[in-house]
Image (cartoon, rainbow, N blue to C red):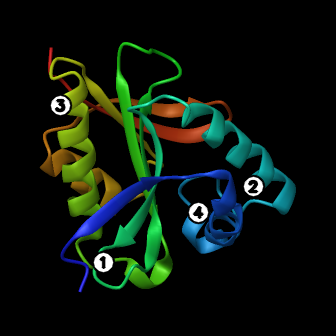
Amino acid sequence: MYNTLEFKKYTAEDFMLFKELVKEDEIMKYISGKGLTPEEAEKKFASILDINRDPLLGYFKVIDSESQLFLGDCKLVNYKKDPTVFEIGYLLQKEFWRKGLGTKICESMLAMAKHIDANKDVVGIIDPDNVASRKLLTKFGFQSYFSGIEDEIATEKLMLKRS
């Protein structure tokens, strides 16, 4: 199971799926510190749909091809603080943690980024306490270049240099 993943952009019909994913404190611990309220989820989802108007980039549902189960989501977007850089990220439902899915998602997002612009650097932004995400990014050649407080949140940024 989970051998082949599909990545489908979120559409307006997917809000309930998204809301259920991001309401969990444990899942959102390293993203926002806690689960999102319905209002916060609605605001975030509206921004996702706006970003998803880009034909190539966006936020994607991660789906197991075999079972069609919704596993979580991921993103490949232009980094908002520097649009000359891509940003990748992912979020999985708790029951799919520690199954190698982060590696598969990262591989897919990096391949997509390379296909769009092979020379564009890629940033991954994590909570400094998220050891698993740091390990995953460094496995793909990302190097830490910032660790501190940004927008009132503990943040570590890792960059994959392609230029």
Q: Amino acid at mark 4?
A: Lys
The secondary structure type at the circle numbered 4 is loop
First in sequence: mark 3 or mark 2? Answer: 2
Name the residue at 43% across, 80% down. 69
- Residue beneath disc 1: 98
Is residue 90 placed above or below 160 in the rendered structure? Answer: below
Identify the disc placed on residue 114.
3
- Calculate the distance from the C-alpha at mark 1 to the C-alpha at mark 2: 25 Å
Name the residue at 24% across, 39% down. 112
First in sequence: mark 1 or mark 4? Answer: 4
Q: Nearer the viewer, mark 1 or mark 3?
A: 3
- Residue beneath disc 2: 41
Q: Amino acid at mark 1?
A: Arg
Name the residue at 43% across, 73% down. 71
Identify the disc placed on residue 29.
4
Name the residue at 51% across, 18% down. 81
